[in-house]
Image (spheres, rainbow, N blue to C red):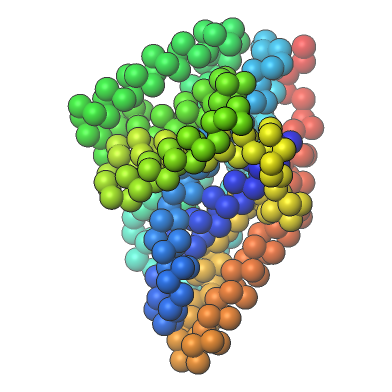
């Protein structure tokens, strides 16, 4: 396990959580400018996730055999990883929507939500599931070239990346357009993760730590000042790639290794990503937000801190008791015999 990569998973999920918590925090009179500033840019966590996904896929498959049996195992594990964590949370979300119906029911496509085939947040029961559609699409692309030699896979992704980049710069795609999904600039972030692994022996050199930090800062700043889907992929994607490289550089040079508690949070980052909106909704429906808005300032700040910590702990518990056992059970099923 690359512990710093696990740490980044935790940080990315927490960023997305804070991003969605921000309007409720402000509605309760929260005044922490540090929290607000971080939350405003919390969507960046998704870009980090995409780069990590591309890296992890290469890290776990390129060194080993890649024949028909390995491809079946790859597909089984990837689909189990996505759906065994997602479907229980989807069921809980449907239950909450039945108990607390709202306007979102009018726009939801339940079939698309179950299968994760819609990149439109408004059509998903869990709005964050839009990103899982891109995950599954990348897995499909990777499966098409899975049995090829490493260099061939690299060349295919170079060609695909150039095609996506040309389309992005010329057509200015939008997320709701189906063609823009198939040629989404967000795919560049997955490709970036793959190439980080492919060229890891060069990129993880200690001498490149400072240049990588500079790239991460400059590209992140550019992403905050140049909105839009294409700019997000180019700027935030570059910053996320640089951050992943930095984490690998620090671990390779033995300058920093994430502490165990952060690694454990990284283990349950997918659960946190899926559940945090449900916890926020319960937080509001139970009247906690309104109650905190009527309290002294220190009580409001402490209340949100306790809520954040509680969500982290509950997400980890759900990971241990639900997501991980389901994933392991599915992975034990033999779908393909060599």
Q: Nearer the viewer, residue 323 or 250?
A: 250
- Measuring from the top left, give residue 85's x and y in whole percent: 63, 47
Q: Residue at x 54, y 31 (%)?
A: 208
Asked which quadrant contains residue 3, the reply is top right
Residue 267 in view in this figure: no
Q: Is residue 4 above or below residue 206?
A: below
Asked which quadrant contains residue 179, the reply is top left
Residue 35 in view in this figure: yes
Q: Is residue 231 above or below residue 96?
A: above
Q: Residue at x 72, y 38 (%)?
A: 254
Q: Nearer the viewer, residue 206 or 120?
A: 206
Q: Is residue 32 left or right of 262 when viewed as pictured?
A: left
Q: Is residue 62 above or below residue 246?
A: above
* Picture quarter with the N terminus: top right
Q: Is residue 79 left or right of 96 when viewed as pictured?
A: right
**Number of disc labels:** 0
- Measuring from the top left, give residue 189's x and y in whole percent: 44, 33
Q: Residue at x 42, y 71 (%)?
A: 33
* Picture quarter with the C terminus: top right
Q: Is residue 105 above or below residue 257?
A: below
Q: Nearer the viewer, residue 141 or 27?
A: 27
Q: Residue at x 46, y 68 (%)?
A: 34
């Amino acid at each position: 396990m690359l512990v710093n990569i696990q740490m980044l998973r935790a940080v990315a999920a927490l960023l997305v959580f804070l991003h969605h918590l921000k309007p409720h925090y402000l509605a309760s009179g929260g005044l922490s400018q540090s929290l607000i500033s971080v939350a405003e840019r919390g969507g960046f966590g998704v870009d980090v996730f995409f780069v990590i996904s591309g890296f992890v896929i290469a890290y776990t498959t390129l060194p080993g055999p890649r024949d028909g049996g390995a491809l079946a195992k790859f597909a089984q594990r990837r689909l189990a990883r996505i759906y065994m964590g997602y479907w229980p949370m989807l069921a809980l979300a449907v239950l909450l929507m039945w108990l607390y119906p709202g306007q979102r029911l009018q726009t939801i496509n339940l079939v698309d939500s179950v299968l994760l085939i819609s990149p439109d947040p408004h059509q998903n029961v869990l709005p964050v599931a839009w990103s899982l559609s891109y995950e599954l699409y990348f897995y499909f692309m990777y499966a098409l070239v899975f049995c090829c030699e490493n260099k061939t896979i690299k060349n295919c992704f170079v060609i695909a990346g150039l095609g996506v980049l040309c389309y992005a710069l010329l057509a200015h795609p939008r997320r709701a357009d189906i063609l823009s999904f198939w040629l989404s600039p967000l795919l560049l972030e997955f490709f970036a993760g793959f190439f980080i692994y492919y060229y890891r022996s060069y990129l993880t050199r200690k001498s490149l730590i400072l240049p990588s930090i500079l790239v991460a800062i400059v590209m992140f700043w550019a992403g905050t000042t140049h909105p839009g889907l294409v700019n997000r992929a180019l700027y935030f994607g570059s910053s996320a790639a640089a951050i992943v490289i930095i984490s690998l550089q620090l671990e390779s040079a033995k300058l920093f290794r994430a502490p165990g508690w952060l690694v454990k949070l990284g283990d349950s980052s997918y659960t946190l990503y899926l559940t945090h909106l449900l916890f926020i909704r319960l937080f509001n429906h139970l009247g906690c937000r309104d109650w905190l808005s009527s309290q002294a300032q220190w009580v409001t700040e402490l209340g949100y801190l306790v809520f954040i910590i509680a969500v982290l702990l509950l997400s980890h518990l759900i990971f241990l008791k639900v997501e991980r056992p389901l994933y392991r059970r599915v992975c034990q099923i033999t779908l393909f015999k060599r």
